[in-house]
Amino acid sequence: MKRVVVGLSGGVDSSVAAYLLQEQGYEVIGLFMKNWHDDSVTISNECPWLEDSNDALLVAEKLGIPFQTVDLSEEYKEKIVDYMFNEYEQGRTPNPDVLCNREIKFDVFMKIALSLGADYVATGHYCRKGTIENEEGETYQLLAGKDGNKDQSYFLCQLSQEQLSKALFPIGELTKPEVREIAAKLDLITADKKDSQGLCFIGKVRLPDFLQQKLQPKEGIIIEVASEADVFNTIETEFPSQEAAFAYQSRKRDYSDQLSKVVGKHQGAHYFTKGQRKGLNVGGTKEALFVIETDVEKNIIYTGQGSNHPGLLKKALYIKNDEVHWVREDLALQSNQTMDVMARIRYRQELQEATLHQFEEGMYVVFKEPQSAITEGQFVAWHKEDEVLGSGVIS
């Protein structure tokens, strides 16, 4: 009998995942990951992880499976929290959820599971795993979940073949309503529980409050850049190479000498991210102001009016070679090769037509249509149909 460890989070998805694995004849063990307990940054005095671990325990009791809690907060702080602060300080916007899966759930947690004699680790993600048999053995596919509304394959876009070989996603074939229905039939305490919002570890913490604990406020100016500023005029230049042309399209624009005016003050450029609209507290503009660029060195936020402001739009992005990751290692591009794909630059974005161009130093993802708020530090993931082939950190 194969043994599988389920990461029980205290939510409905992982509860039903555990039940389905039991039905499939696995020996199931439930583990709750305690990832965070720095009371200095929780907003209220409620303690979400206590409530969640209690719900996880009740689910395990109901299903009659062994249960224990593992404290991963040390690894968490080092691999996720410190990384986040470091990224924000540099004016990048990290994606802790993608990282949490790569570094915690399918690494630290997986090692604990394997040390308990598990053959597999299972989670309540809405995605599926495919297997291709070939002469060399098996190649694993990361596939979108059946529920188009809830597909979470994006969050797993950094997993490796090794990690996928040991992963199971029992609810990938189901829709959220079907999952809730199963939980209700089994009378599980999590059946009607709301989906957790916010970062995968901080629970009830608002991001700016969290950042303010570690990154000191520093007053700076908010500048509005006119949409007719010269920097947006595309000059028909001849580029020496395709690579140079893409580098130009994906560059960080310099607004320092552009047609602009000071419209307000902020408490620290590192609290803001491209495409952000809330929290600027600047009124009196005809259309809403959006952040089009942040300069953490000079502590300036550049903004523009309206969601179609040219400062938000770009057709290309760059990924350094060491941050290009292929889930399907067998399909990785060699230098000067290209591949047509469908790609997204954030969770829940509709897939966009794009072409990957691999060069000596790194890869450009060039979109058919300009994309809004391509943000450094976030992940771009590329697909063929419903399979995630790879991903990379936008640089």
Image (cartoon, rainbow, N blue to C red):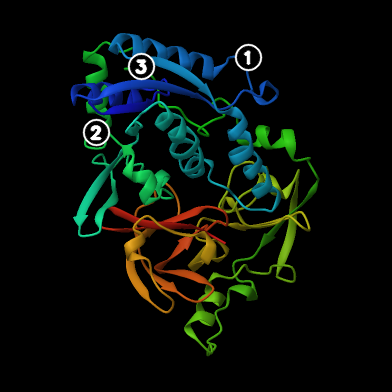
Q: Which mark is residue 45?
A: 1
* Mark 1 / mark 2, whichever is N-terminal: 1
| Closer-to-camera residue (4/278) | 4
Measure the alpha-carbon separation of dots 3 and 2.
16 Å
Q: Give percent across and percent down for residue 317.
A: 50, 66
SS category of the residue bearing label 1? loop
Residue at horizontal 35 percent and vertical 16 percent from the top: 190
Q: Is residue 283 visible?
A: no
Q: Using the image, determine if residue 250 lies above or below residue 344.
A: below
SS of the residue at dot 2? loop
Give the mark nearest the N terminus, 1 or 3: 1
Residue at point 26% right, 18% down? Answer: 183
- Horizontally, residue 62 falls left or right of residue 10, namely left
Disc 2 target residue: 175
Q: Give the percent coordinates (x, y) of residue 159.
A: 41, 48
At label 1, which amino acid type do we have? Answer: Asn
Residue shown at the point (63%, 18%) measured from the top left: 44
Q: Residue furthest right?
A: 219
* Of the image marks 3 and 2, the number of the one nearer the N terminus: 2
Q: Are marks 3 and 2 in contact (CB under 8 Å)?
A: no
**Dot 3 alpha-carbon crowd within 10 angstroms: few under 14, some 14 to 19, many 20 or more:** many
Residue 350 seen:
yes
Name the element at disc 3.
loop
Q: CA distance from mark 1 to mark 2?
A: 34 Å
Q: Which residue is mark 3?
A: 190
Name the kind of residue labelled 2 in the image: Thr
- Residue 40, image x, y percentages: 70, 23
Which amino acid, by three-letter code, is at mark 3? Thr
